[in-house]
Structures are given as structure tokens and as C-alpha cells.
Image (spheres, grey):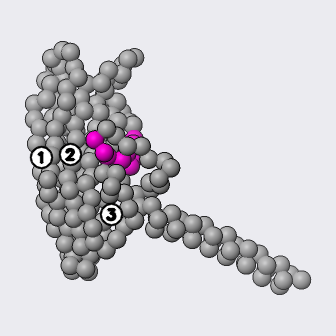
Amino acid sequence: MKLFKKIFATIIAFSAITAVLSQSVFASANYSYGVSPSNYSISKDGFVLMSENQYKENGYIITDRVYTKETEVSPISKSGSRTVRHEKDIAADNGDKELLYTFYVSGFFKWDLDNDTVTVSNVTNGYTSYISGTYPKVVSSTKEYKSNQGATFLLGNKYAYAKHILVLQNAFGSKSTYTVYVDVNVRGISTKS
């Protein structure tokens, strides 16, 4: 009887683990980047919101969003392309949470696992100021992007990235640096979405 209980408990545990693992594999295979047709929203310029996060940094409230083009939401494949956009809102950490700046970087990524290549092109960046006063003010806005980065023989995956760095200065001369970053590796996977 004890042997039967052990065998039965083992079968139940194995079935539960198999069910959980098969569901997570099914979900990631069908809807890469965690998006299904029922839970994404489309912005005015055709981008789909993939993730959103809010946190406090340097005395400001940051809202961090990652988007991809609506027509490019698809299962991960050995080769393909998609446009990824990373955007941040910087708001005052006060009662009214006044929006101060929005800045972004966007790039068109193309990957091919069989040829071990990934490129980024059509990189755009920018920022919009919503402040009525002088501070915080933008003292620097720079863009950087590269293709076929990283990966050494047998270690890691090559990736391409685009980055926008925004430096703000407050009325006392103190500077804060904010970065938006998007990347895609040779498997079509982004660390941001």
C-alpha cells in the first residue's frame, strides 16, 4: 500500500510539473514578448505597448515603456525583423506629478540566427519638454547604436542595440542621467520587452 501511495504521489507530481511547463512553453511559443491579441494596446503611431513600469529615480517619477510595431508582433523565428521603441516619461515627484519630459529611442532590428547576424537601422531618438519653467533643463542628448555586438566563440548571442542618453540639470547645478535602450539578439529576443 505504501509503495502504491508513493507511485501515485510521484505520478501526480510529475503530471503537475509537466502541465505547468507545457503551458509556459506554449505561451512563449505562440506569443513572444508576452503579448496576446486580447491584452495589448495600440498607440496612435502603430506601436503596441509591450511592457510598462513605474519607479522613482533621482527625485523624479519615471514611467518606462517598451513598444513594437503592431504588424511585427509575432512568434520568435530564426530570422525576421521588427521595430522596437523604448520611451520614458520623467515626472515631478510632488502632489500633481507634473510631466516634465518624454524621451525615446527607436530602431529597426533585423536578425538571422543561421548566419549569426543582427543589425539595427533607422535609429531615431528625441525628447519633448513639458515644463513651464527653466529647470530641470536638458544639457545633453546623445544617441548611440551598433550591430553585431557581443558573443564570443561558443558564448552568448550577438546583438544589436540603440541607446539615447539624456542628461538633465536642476537649478542647483546637479545633473541626472537617464537612458533608454533597446536591443535584439540573433534569436529575435529583446531584453527590454
Inspect the image, locate mark 1, and give the three-letter code of the amino acid beneath it.
Lys
Toward the right, the furthest residue is: 1
Q: Residue at x 31, y 74 (%)?
A: 78
Of badges 2 and 1, nearer the viewer stands 2
According to the picture, the residue beneath numbered tag 1 turns out to be 143
Q: Is residue 92 positioned above or below 113 on the image?
A: above
Inspect the image, locate mark 3, and give the three-letter code of the amino acid beneath it.
Ile
Regarding residue 24, the answer to whether it shows in the image is yes
Inspect the image, locate mark 2, and give the three-letter code of the amino acid beneath it.
Val
- Report x, y in % for residue 94: 36, 19
Regarding residue 149, the answer to whether it shows in the image is no
Do tag 3 and tag 2 residues touch (Cβ < 8 Å)? no
The residues tagged by marks 3 and 2 sit, at their Cα atoms, a distance apart of: 17 Å
- Report x, y in % for residue 1: 89, 83
Label ID, residue 105:
2
Mark earlier in primary sequence (3, 2): 2
The residues tagged by marks 1 and 3 sit, at their Cα atoms, a distance apart of: 22 Å
Q: Residue at x 77, y 82 (%)?
A: 7
What residue span does the magenta drawing correspond to? 45-53
Mark earlier in primary sequence (2, 1): 2
According to the picture, the residue beneath numbered tag 3 turns out to be 189
Do tag 2 and tag 1 residues touch (Cβ < 8 Å)? yes
